[in-house]
Amino acid sequence: MTSTKQPPVLLLHGVGLDQSMWGPLREHLGRESVALDLPGHGARPPLRSAQSLASMAADVLERINTREPVHLVGFSLGALIAQYLARFAPERVLTLSAVNSVCQRTVEEAAAVEERLATAGTNFAQGVDRAIERWFPASASAVDPQLIEDTRQIMAGNDLESYLHAYAVFARGDREIAGELAAITQPTLAITGELDPGSTPEMSRRLAAAIPNSRLRIVPSARHMLPVENPLALATELNSFFSDNEGKHA
């Protein structure tokens, strides 16, 4: 029997955020979707020990409440976790979408993120303000001010120890998964913003080159918070990608 039901979409947010960041995108997707809080974020218990990409992925895997393969979409840290799940739980993942993902940081890029990690706990409030300004520069952002303020409040409300443990995984997780990317077999979309200074277009190019069955999309004029800044463009690319890859697996 052939089912016309579309596979569900599972959404994984970035470090310091929570599942609510996907609200604007979900309005445009027009598909069944579920957004999970990452370990130590949102409604999840705080993190009180060092984590790895493997441990965070295992936590997420336990909470995927469907046995059918999903369209797995991860943003930033969530994209690294999604890559890990696609590699090591392939039966659960129909397609992989890595949104604003880092990949194979250079020595200089790795040093820069390690420096941010080292200082992240010293003046957290100032760090939140700097992140908001990077993501939504006052001179250029057309994002609803209320969405920007909501993002600021979510960031400011983080449990600091949890944030630092998660940020360490974000800072180092690309090394943990780098050697496994070529073994990812699912259709993969690597997409980022043209102006993203951290998860750069070059990183998405590296990701698309490393994973065999990939497509690359760079969204013009967008920065790091693509799901919030231009959810329509992201939803359009995701829906096209999903549709192109449904019905290919028995």
Image (spheres, rainbow, N blue to C red):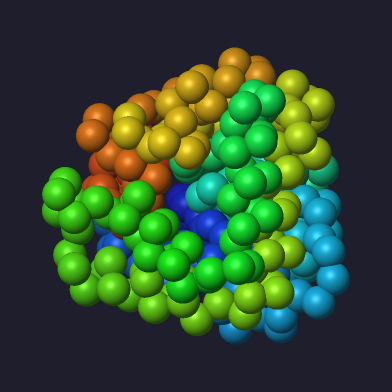
What is the x, y in percent for residue 69?
65, 50
Q: Residue at x 41, y 57 (%)?
A: 131
Q: Nearer the viewer, residue 168 or 66?
A: 168
Q: Is residue 61 visible?
A: no
What is the x, y in percent for residue 27?
28, 63
In the rendered image, which quarter contains the C terminus? top right
Q: Residue at x 17, y 65 (%)?
A: 144
Q: Is residue 134 left or right of residue 91?
A: left
What is the x, y in percent for residue 15?
57, 60
Q: Residue at x 39, y 58 (%)?
A: 130
Count of numbered circles in the view: 0
Q: Residue at x 33, y 30 (%)?
A: 194
Q: Nearer the viewer, residue 131 or 154?
A: 131
Q: Is residue 74 above or below residue 66?
A: above
Q: Is residue 10 left or right of residue 219?
A: right
What is the x, y in percent for residue 222?
28, 39
Q: Nearer the viewer, residue 10 or 172?
A: 172
Residue 88 sits in quarter: top right
Q: Is residue 107 visible?
A: yes
Q: Nearer the viewer, residue 25 or 108?
A: 108
